[in-house]
Image: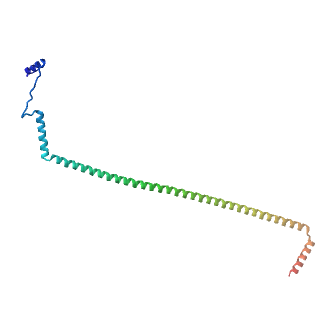
Amino acid sequence: MVELSFLSADAAAHGEAVVHADPTALMLDPTGWVSLAMAVFIAILIWQGVPRLIGRMLDGQIAAIRGRLDEARALRAEAEALRDEYARKLAAIEADARQMVAHAEAEAEALRARAEADAAALVERRARMAEDKIAAAERAAIDELRARTVDAATEAATRLIAARHDAKADKALVDSTIAGLGSVH
């Protein structure tokens, strides 16, 4: 081999073209044999029904994917229905909450108004009671003052009569009283 490489190097140095002979079998070079082997392999695959098998496998995959897509669509529709239902429930709950708050506010306002009215009535009753007590105290004071005045006047009249009346005046008073009694009947 060493000699051949010198020969081809020597031929290349002199400008001569080196021609290599490729081995062939049945007039086919290696590329032809690979092409023939590939054609035979594909023919065997077709003869054995591999394309139909691959087609069935692909159809199965397509059907499985289609089933998953249909299931995903159904799940999405169900999720949207649940979302809409929960949105309706949430809206109803919010409306109920607003109604409860409004009712509670109205009830609180009514309680406040009732408490104000009760407080005003209580203040009015107590004021009336205080006025009644004051009026009663005034009447009692006036009655007591009248009683004292009567007592003082009676005492003064008694003293005055006792001081100015003597036995003679008493006799004349008794006689006039008796005379007045006799004329009544």
Query: Which quadrant would residue 21 be assigned to in this image?
Result: top left
| Quadrant into which the N terminus falls | top left
Image-based side of 164 in relation to 115, left or right: right
Furthest residue toward right: 168
Query: Which quadrant would residue 115 be assigned to in this image?
Result: bottom right
| Quadrant into which the C terminus falls | bottom right
Question: Residue at (12%, 41%) from the top-left corner?
Answer: 41
On screen, residue 178 above or below 46 = below
Question: Residue at (46%, 54%) from the top-left corner?
Answer: 94
On screen, residue 116 above or below 41 = below
Question: Residue at (27%, 50%) from the top-left corner?
Answer: 66
Residue 22, percent from left and from top: 9, 29
On screen, residue 48 above or below 169 = above
Image-based side of 105 in relation to 56, left or right: right
Residue 87, percent from left and from top: 42, 53
Colour convention of the picture: rainbow
Front residue of this view, candidates 185 and 113? 113
Residue 123, percent from left and from top: 65, 59
Question: Residue at (32%, 52%) from the top-left corner?
Answer: 73
Query: Which quadrant would residue 131 be assigned to in this image?
Result: bottom right
Image-based side of 151 in relation to 16, left or right: right
